[in-house]
Amino acid sequence: MSKINKEELAIMSGEKNLRHSGRYSVPIISLQGTDNVFQRKFPDTSGKWETKDLDDKELEVVFLKIRRRLFQFKIDSSGKSTGEALFSNEHDSFTDKVTILETTIGGKTMKIDEGYYDEIREKYQGLKVHIQIYCLMGDEVIQLVVKGSSLSSLFKYLKEDIADDEYSYEYVTKLTKLENAGQLGKYYSIEFSKGKKSDLEIIGPKIKEVFTALNIAQPIRQEEQDENKPPVESYEQASQEQENKEEEEDDDIPVIE
C-alpha cells in the first residue's frame, strides 16, 4: 500500500484552508533605486512592517515562485504623489483575471474593478508591472520585488542566461546593483546573473512549500477591508520623481511563461 500523504489530503479536503486561512507573509527585499541600497521589510510581532537597510553589495537567492502585481501611485496636478495608490492582487500570468483595489491616505482599501489583465491595463494605463519573486535567501523564504528598469535585466536573464532545457531554480541567482543615467538623473537597478548550481534536494521541498502556502491563502474579499492591506511599497510614500527615475524603461517586456 502506498504511503498516505496527510498534508496533501488536508489540502484536498479543504480542512487546511479552513484551519489556516489568511495571507502568506514573508520578508520583502527590494532595491531603493535612488539610494543604491537593498532594503529588507518585515512584519514585527504586531504586524507592523519595519524596514532595514542591507549592507550587502550582492545578494544570492534561488527563485521558487514568480508572480506579478500591478501598481500605481496616484499623482496630483503638480506631478507629486498623493499618498494614494491603485494595486492588484498577486497573480501568476497575464491571462489571469485580476482584482484592482484602491487605498486612500487614511489607509482605507476598497475593491474598484475586476477583469482580465489586458482589459485592466487598457483601462488603467498608469498601472506598472511589479514582478514579485518568492526566493530562498540563505535558509529564509523572502519575496523579491522587481520593478522599473530592473525588469529588463530580469527578462534578459531568464531568456538568455537560462537555457531552454533548464529552469532558474536550478541555479543560485546573483543580485547586484547597476548604475544608470537617465533624463531625471542617476539611479540604480538590479542586475541578475547566474551563479552555481542549487541543491534541488533543498529547493524542491521549498518550491512545494511556497506553492502550498499561496494556494491555501484565502482570496481577497472586499468586505474584509481591515485585512485588505496594499503592497508594502505603497507605505513608502516614495516621491513621483523617484518612481519616474526607476521606471524610465518600458515595463511591458513579456514575461517568460
Image (cartoon, rainbow, N blue to C red):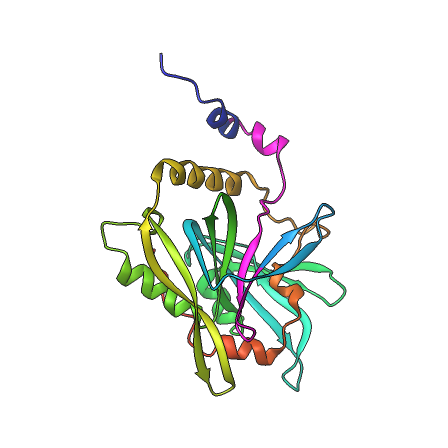
| Image location (x, y in percent) of residue 123 | 52, 70
Q: Residue furthest top?
A: 1
| Residue 199 seen in the current view | yes
Asked if the stretch drawn in magenta spans residue 76, the answer is no
Image-based side of 46 in relation to 146, left or right: right
Residue nearest the viewer, comparing 17 with 30: 30
Asked if the stretch drawn in magenta spans residue 33, the answer is yes
The residue sitting at 74% across, 47% down in the picture is 46
Image quadrant occupied by the N terminus = top left
| Tally of numbered tags | 0
The answer to which image quadrant residue 81 occupies is bottom right
The residue sitting at 32% across, 66% down in the picture is 156
Image quadrant occupied by the C terminus = bottom left
The residue sitting at 36% across, 48% down in the picture is 169
| Image location (x, y in percent) of residue 206 | 44, 39
Q: Check the image and report above or below for 210 versus 196.
A: above
Magenta span: 13-39
Q: Check the image and report above or below for 32 versus 94.
A: below
Residue nearest the viewer, comparing 52 with 84: 52
Q: Residue furthest right?
A: 106
